[in-house]
Each structure stands twice: as structure tokens, then as C-alpha cells.
Image: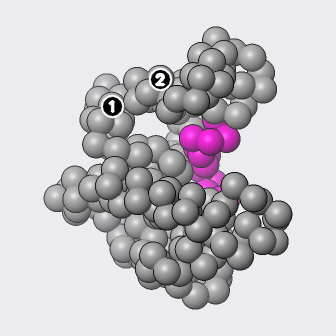
Amino acid sequence: MTARLLIVGPQGSGKGTQGVRVGDALGIAVVSTGDVFRAHVKEGTELGLQVTSILDAGDLVPDELTSAVVRDRLGQADAADGFLLDGYPRNLAQVMHLDQFLGGRDEKLDAVIALIVPRNESVARLTARAAEQGRTDDTEEAIATRLGIYERETAPILDVYRTRGIVDEIDGVGTLDEVTARIFAALEARGIVAPSAV
């Protein structure tokens, strides 16, 4: 079946892991902005070189370039029958870019999975992950900064999608399997069912 989904949640919400689970179960491409950027950089594409020069200068990748990278990825064959976006759109400008792109293909998002995790839970998870992986850049201050950016820039996109009636708020606290089950229950209520469950 065709499904065009977006998964949104603060750092530490588990959206990367849950996104892969949902994509695998539905048989749709998982399009993680970070992975797509890394692939372009690794392959030395024109987009990859642009991204590298921006990041090397310590700047953020501008919305236009991010949107161009995502459009390129969604134009690939494996995304023709559906996709799950992770990490894009990140702000209201990118929502507009995605609307224009999908509108040009006579498509729209079917559902937005919003993982709801309290701030203190996100901080605890990220701090634990940093300790496990020896990530010295994940200080409490750095984590708080990233969560602040999410709250200011990304959380508002949910208001746009709420007005369209496509947001499913999922309690992101619990075991991996519990959260996955909640996601699939919400998707099934919209008629989006994994092929193995049909």
C-alpha cells in the first residue's frame, strides 16, 4: 500500500528507531535527512560538496538546499510508492517547500506521527546515550540547546498539520515495542495497515 508519512519528535524520542520499524513494516522508503546528507557527502555529489562547504564553515544548511536534497531523494524509484520522512520538514519554511513539491506530484502527507516525550525524559535518554557511546559533545548544555531549537522551530509545524487533521500524537514513553504498537494502532485507525497485518 502507499503511505506518505512524517515522524516528528524531540532528540531522544526514539523517532529514528521507530521510523525504521514503521518503514520496514509498511515496505516504504525511510528518508532520514541526516542519512541523505551523509550519502551525498560520501559520494562527493554536487549537493554533497555544497553541504560540506557549508558545514565546514560552521553554518547550518539553508532550507532551500535541504529541500533540494530531500526532493532529489523523494524522486528516486524506491520512494515512488510511499515514504517516511525523518528530520524534514524541520521548520515552517520547509513545510511550504514540501507542500509545493508534493502538490506538484498531486500528492500529500497521509499522517504525521508525533512522538510526545517530556523534556526531562529526552535529557535523561540523551545523557545516558552519551555516556554509553562516549560522546563528549552531548553535554547537558548542548542537549538543552538542541531541545530548545526543536521546541522553537520544529514543534510549530505540528500546528500546521493539526489543522489538516493528520497528526497522531503518540506517547513516546515506554518500551520500544509498546511505542511501536501505539504507532501502528494510530495508523490502522487511518486505514494504513502493514501488509503482513492485512
Alpha carbon distance from label 1 to label 2: 11 Å
Q: Quadrant of residue 63?
A: top left
What percent of the width, then of the height, locates residue 92? Answer: 28, 42
The amino acid type found where label 2 is placed reads Leu
Classify residue 15 as left or right of residue 112. Answer: right
The amino acid type found where label 1 is placed reads His
Numbered disc 2: secondary structure: helix
Numbered disc 1: secondary structure: helix
Q: Which disc number belongs to residue 97?
A: 1
What percent of the width, then of the height, locates residue 72? Answer: 54, 24
**Disc 2 designates what residue?**
65
Name the foreground residue: 75 vs 143.
Answer: 143
Name the foreground residue: 118 vs 71.
Answer: 118
Name the foreground residue: 56 vs 159.
Answer: 56
Mark found first going from the N terminus, 1 or 2: 2
Query: Is residue 113 in view?
Result: no
What kind of secondary structure does the magenta stretch mostly adopt? helix
The image shows residue 181, relative to residue 43, as above or below, that is below
Q: Is residue 76 magenta?
A: no
The span shown in magenta is: 18-36
Classify residue 90 as left or right of residue 78. Answer: left
Q: Is residue 26 magenta?
A: yes
Q: Residue furthest top?
A: 46
What percent of the width, then of the height, locates residue 157? Answer: 29, 52
